[in-house]
Image (cartoon, grey):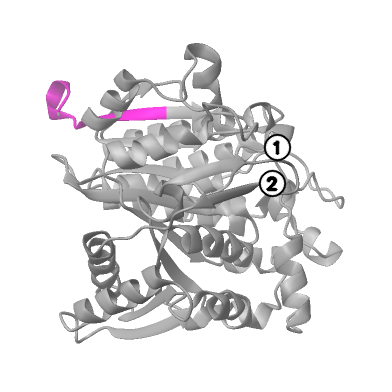
Amino acid sequence: MTAEGDLPQYRLVAIPGDGVGPDVVAAAKRVMAAAGARFGFGVEWHDIIVGGAGIDAYGMPIRPEDLAACAVSDAVLLGAVGGPKWDDPTAAVRPEQALFAMRGGLGLFANLRPVSVHPALVPASPLRPELLDGVDMLIVRELTGGLYFGERSEAAGPAGARAAHDVLPYSEPEIARVARLAFELARGRRKRLTSVDKANVLATSRLWRTVVHEIAVEYPDVALDDRLVDACAMQIVRSPASFDVLVTENLFGDILSDEASVLAGSLGMLPSASVGSRRTAHGLHGLYEPIHGSAPDIAGQDLANPIGTILSVAMLLRWSLGRADAADAVELAVSAALDAGYRTGDIWPRSAAAAESCTSVGTVAMADAIVARIGAGAGSAAAPPDAGTPTGEPPVDDLDVGTTVATAQLLGLL
């Protein structure tokens, strides 16, 4: 689609969602506008109300017409959905049902979660610095099968004898399509693929391993390694740089990617893309979102880290709009802002010495820093307006990393 004067114009859906979702999506829209101004394209945004906000407004987490709007767009940007207000597990409608509807309805069968560690954020990670050198992994999570989509029965029976069940289904076509995508991605990187399963226990994992190995013969240039999920979880904190691309089923991918986020310093740093096989005029149709949740305790307080959402915009630009030039500029601007010392609370350094060279900022000022560097060009040292002042006290930290920290302590890694 082109606008007047043949200026490219893209149609995007924005889903602010719940909690901090509106905060980080607003920041990401500003970054997209800055990229468009620099590289000569426009964006037509269509905002829709989804998730808990959708339940409040319409009595349902997503309406059919909103799903249809997502389907005809070039791509979708999502903030976050959910929160304590809608956490009743017995409720007939829940915010997360919107995610399942979009994944299934839009054919988004693979979630891509890149994990790398910016050198300036090594002090924010709970792992020893030497373990973070060279970390650059891509987790490919199957998104429309497994426990989350299987048959289930809620708890029933008298107290003391209640029972519930969840069914974990996978078919060969579901496994094959995500495995092929993972092999293709590994072929374009360092040509190493780790397939994560629980084949010593689960029948679906044994099918998973069989299908992955059958497909591997089509990719003789990619080294395939099988890893049980519990061993993989340990290896992610023990030797994270040993991984290139990981492919795994829905539940395992959900857990492992959240664990891996601690390597980068915070859940707030990491982007993701949910994609299928459908292409638009510009690229691969997809839904882009940070991996963090809605964090309702800090919503609307200018405390959320927008970088995960901003880097999701970079993935959107590259994968769905075919704008590698703008994607590179956004990523370089994020890197330059971090190099300049701007930090939200979740990535504040853990030591006072490292904090001396940092500036405490909120959601808006972090976006300001990134927008300024997009406009000025890659690597610019331009100072953003109202960036805040240095402080020796760490701001509010909205990330609970206790479980991963405890695991790392047991392994002697801290």
Label 2 element class: loop
Mark 1 surroundings within 10 Å by alpha-carbon count, few (fewer than 14), some (14 through 19), many (20 or more): many
The crowding category of the residue bearing disc 2, from other C-alpha atoms within 10 Å (few below 14, some 14 to 19, many at least 20), is many
Q: Name the residue type under label 1.
A: Leu
Front position in the image: 336 or 50: 50
Instruction: Report how far apart the C-alphas of labels 2 and 1 lie in the structure.
Output: 7 Å
Q: Quadrant of residue 101?
A: top left
- Reading the image, the residue beneath label 1 is 303
Question: Image check: 92 left or right of 238?
Answer: left
- Quarter placement of the N terminus: top left
User: Does the magenta-highlighted stretch encompass residue 3?
Assistant: yes
Give the magenta part as a residue range.
2-14
Contact (Cβ within 8 Å) of mark 2 with mark 1: yes
For the C terminus, which image quadrant? bottom right
First-in-chain label (2 vs 1)? 1
Magenta span includes 391: no
Q: Is residue 140 left or right of residue 165?
A: left
Q: Which residue is mark 2?
A: 344
**Relative image position of residue 232 (x, y in whole percent):** 53, 77
